[in-house]
Amino acid sequence: MRAKLTVALSAAALLLAAPSAASAHYYMGKAEARSNARDFAIDRYGVIDPGIYCRPQGAKQPDPRYDYHRWVCGWYEEGCGGAVLIYGSHSPTRYYYRVLSGQRCE
């Protein structure tokens, strides 16, 4: 009985110590930030295939060893473009955004 209790307590401790899947998207890599920015530009402005560039907020270049919470991303397509701040969420299927520069065309 004592061995079963020890195993159960050890398993519970491991579950509590392991990061949950939902918190995995609070920080995101460059590829996920680009994907979210692409989805934003397509959904918000109806562009077809925007070019996307992203950098961590407050940095010129991302360090590939790290994931970041906030990304400044720009998008462009056929003379039009804009910028958006993408930041992570605790929900694995969500991200938040703030428009930095709405669609502008030349």
Image: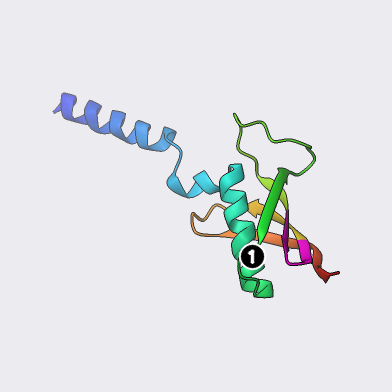
Quadrant for the N terminus in the image:
top left
Question: Horizontal placement of 63 versus 106: left or right?
Answer: left
Q: Amino acid at mark 1?
A: Phe
Look at the picture and state if 99 lies above or below 86: below
Q: Position of residue 60 (x, y in %)?
A: 79, 37
Considering every residue shown, the one lying at the far right of the view is 106
Disc 1: CA contacts within 10 A as few (<14), some (14-19) or many (>=20)? many
Residue 9 position within the rendered picture, expressed as x and y whole percent measured from the top left: 29, 31
Above or below, 72 relative to 5 = below
Q: Main secondary structure of the magenta part?
A: strand
Q: Is residue 50 left or right of residue 81?
A: left
Residue at far front of view: 78
Span of residues in magenta: 74-82
Q: Is residue 26 visible?
A: no
Question: Which residue shows up at 57% across the image and 55% down it?
Answer: 35
Say whether residue 85 is magenta.
no
Label 1 SS: helix
Q: Which residue is mark 1?
A: 40
Q: Residue at x 55, y 60 (%)?
A: 94
Instruction: Relative to 10, say whether 52 is above or below.
Output: below
- Residue ID at (62%, 69%): 42
